[in-house]
């Protein structure tokens, strides 16, 4: 069990049987008064947020969370199918649960899936992913039109801004946390 | 964490504090940090030092010194409070406490005004000071010229909430409502004294003779930040013993250790009317240096010590 003094941003707790993550946290205490732990939390399954002020005596259950390594297999409509690399068990995650990660997902990619009991609730991709540029306007050397970046599309359909020398067919490294171009990758 | 320039500012600030009190004939005292018995307070959690305790405030020893016949004393010292960490809290912080025999809480409020004004003049080049004499915080200028605002706790509840101090106390929501609905508004145009607290919230303060359900206690706020807590001290040892008994009961209910401080009560019975105040030096320095976190004005933050 966590006590109120353990609370901090990023901590995961269980309330009424559901997992929550603390998204903001503020400790207040009048000099002669009670400590107040003002907490904003997000339900990791429904996405609902709420704010609550807790006291020193309040206690919190630790959620039954487990992180498993899974491999991306294929998608079918809005279902994205993954396989547990040790048990070979298969699950699917919805397009909504995947969120922006869909921009970086390629076949056979290994990801970390966070399970609450048997329910997948969060997915973490590797920090860097290499993707092929499928569409880019050609770079004309000596082009002095003055723009520092140009828009391109990569194999997942994701569009981003890159330096002008990046060409169709190049493989580039992208930071999955920000969606930004990092560098070109040599094969 | 402080840079060399920040360390110099902290040093200049401390020297200006000391000069203010020396000029008013206060004696600087330094009392033990490690004690076998503390004043029982149910909402303050002390650190242990083997079978003794680290002080959460120098009040116990300073009041005992007053019983020996000194009449004006001040101290700047480190205090320790377990479980207090945040934007405005550090488990080890610096407190300024001062006591003046023969005064009451209204006299101390006036001296507080004089102290901050004197510091602003001495430290007029600090980042948080504008026009050589006012605070600048969140792009707002806080005028420091006395008299500052004074608001009773009842007036504050009436102005900023849809309940009363007593109702909030009955529901055990006084602190929550004070912190969320009242404090953020206090001390922006000028610093503000919130005073005349319900007597249940001033276990070491004297009840108002004409309104004994209220205690002669005040808190100084500036920019929504609680800076100081002062009172006309309770010097009736029998009443103090009763209040300590209640605190100890509450503490035992929570599983906290609490002991009756006998030598303190004995010395208290020799004290005449006195007023005392505790001020958070780091927090005041935060306002002077324009810092947003307490850590920013400490030589070391807790995490840097590992």
Image: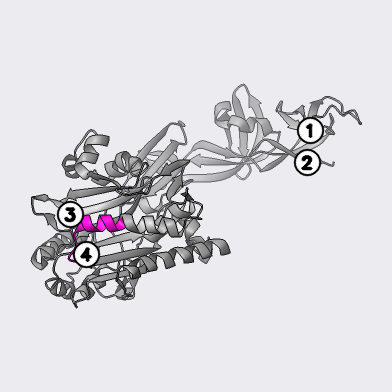
Q: Chain of mark 4?
A: B
Comparing marks 3 and 1, which lies closer to the viewer? Answer: 3
Labels 2 & 1 near each other (Cβ < 8 A): no
Indicate the quadrant containing the C terminus of chain A: top left, top right, bottom left or bottom right: top right
Q: Is A59 left or right of A11, judged from the image as shown?
A: left
Label 4: which residue?
B40
Q: How many marks?
A: 4
Q: Chain of mark 3?
A: B
Label 1: which residue?
A148
Which of pointers 2 and 1 lies earlier in the amino acid sequence?
1
| Mark 3 Cα-neighbour bin, 10 Å: few <14, some 14–19, many ≥20 | many
SS at badge 2: strand
Which of pointers 4 and 3 lies earlier in the amino acid sequence?
4
Labels 3 & 1 near each other (Cβ < 8 A): no
Quarter assignment of residue A122: top right
What segment carries the magenta color? B101-112
Q: CA distance from mark 1 to mark 4?
A: 67 Å
Comparing marks 2 and 1, which lies closer to the viewer? Answer: 1
The answer to whether tags 3 and 1 share a subunit is no
Label 2: which residue?
A183
The answer to whether tags 4 and 2 share a subunit is no
- Between A81 and B187, the one lying in front of the other is B187
SS at badge 1: loop
| Mark 4 Cα-neighbour bin, 10 Å: few <14, some 14–19, many ≥20 | many
Comparing marks 1 and 4, which lies closer to the viewer? Answer: 1
């Amino acid at each position: 069990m966590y006590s109120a003094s353990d609370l901090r941003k990023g901590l995961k707790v269980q309330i009424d049987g559901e997992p929550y993550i603390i998204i903001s946290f503020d400790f207040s205490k009048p000099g002669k008064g009670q400590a107040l732990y003002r907490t904003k939390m997000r339900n990791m399954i429904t996405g609902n947020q709420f704010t609550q002020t807790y006291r020193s005596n309040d206690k919190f259950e630790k959620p039954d969370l487990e992180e498993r390594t899974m491999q991306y297999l294929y998608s079918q409509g809005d279902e994205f199918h993954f396989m547990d690399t040790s048990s070979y068990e298969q699950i699917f995650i919805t397009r909504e649960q995947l969120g922006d990660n869909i921009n970086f997902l390629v076949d056979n990619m290994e990801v970390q899936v966070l399970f609450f009991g048997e329910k997948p609730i969060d997915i973490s991709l590797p920090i860097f992913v290499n993707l092929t540029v499928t569409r880019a306007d050609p770079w004309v050397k000596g082009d002095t039109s003055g723009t520092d970046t140009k828009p391109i599309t990569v194999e997942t359909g994701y569009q981003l801004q890159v330096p002008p020398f990046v060409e169709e067919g190049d493989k580039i490294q992208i930071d999955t946390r920000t969606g930004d171009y990092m560098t070109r990758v040599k094969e | 964490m402080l840079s060399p320039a920040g360390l110099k500012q902290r040093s200049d600030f401390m020297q200006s504090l000391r000069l203010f009190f020396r000029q008013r004939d206060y004696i600087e005292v330094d009392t033990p940090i490690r004690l076998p018995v503390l004043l029982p307070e149910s909402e303050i959690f002390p650190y242990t030092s083997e079978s003794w305790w680290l002080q959460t405030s120098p009040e116990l020893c300073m009041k005992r010194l007053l019983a020996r016949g000194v009449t004006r004393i001040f101290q700047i010292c480190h205090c320790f409070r377990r479980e207090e960490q945040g934007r405005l809290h550090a488990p080890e912080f610096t407190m300024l406490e001062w006591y003046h025999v023969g005064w009451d809480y209204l006299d101390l409020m006036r001296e507080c005004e004089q102290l901050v004004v004197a510091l602003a003049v001495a430290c007029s080049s600090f980042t948080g000071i504008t026009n050589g004499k006012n605070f600048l915080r969140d792009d707002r200028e806080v005028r420091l010229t006395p008299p500052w605002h004074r608001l009773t706790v009842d007036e504050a509840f009436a102005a900023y909430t849809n309940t009363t101090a007593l109702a909030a106390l009955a529901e055990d929501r006084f602190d929550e409502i004070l912190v969320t609905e009242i404090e953020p508004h206090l001390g922006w145009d000028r610093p503000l004294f919130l005073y005349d607290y319900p007597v249940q919230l001033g276990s070491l303060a004297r009840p108002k003779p004409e309104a004994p359900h209220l205690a002669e206690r005040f808190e100084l706020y500036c920019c929504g930040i609680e800076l100081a807590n002062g009172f006309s001290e309770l010097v009736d040892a029998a009443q103090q013993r009763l209040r300590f008994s209640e605190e100890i009961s509450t503490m035992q209910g929570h599983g906290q250790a609490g002991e009756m401080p006998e030598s303190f009560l004995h010395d208290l019975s020799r004290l005449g009317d006195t007023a005392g105040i505790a001020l958070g030096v780091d927090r005041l320095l935060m306002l002077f240096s324009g810092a947003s976190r307490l850590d920013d004005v400490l030589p070391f933050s807790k995490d840097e010590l590992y």
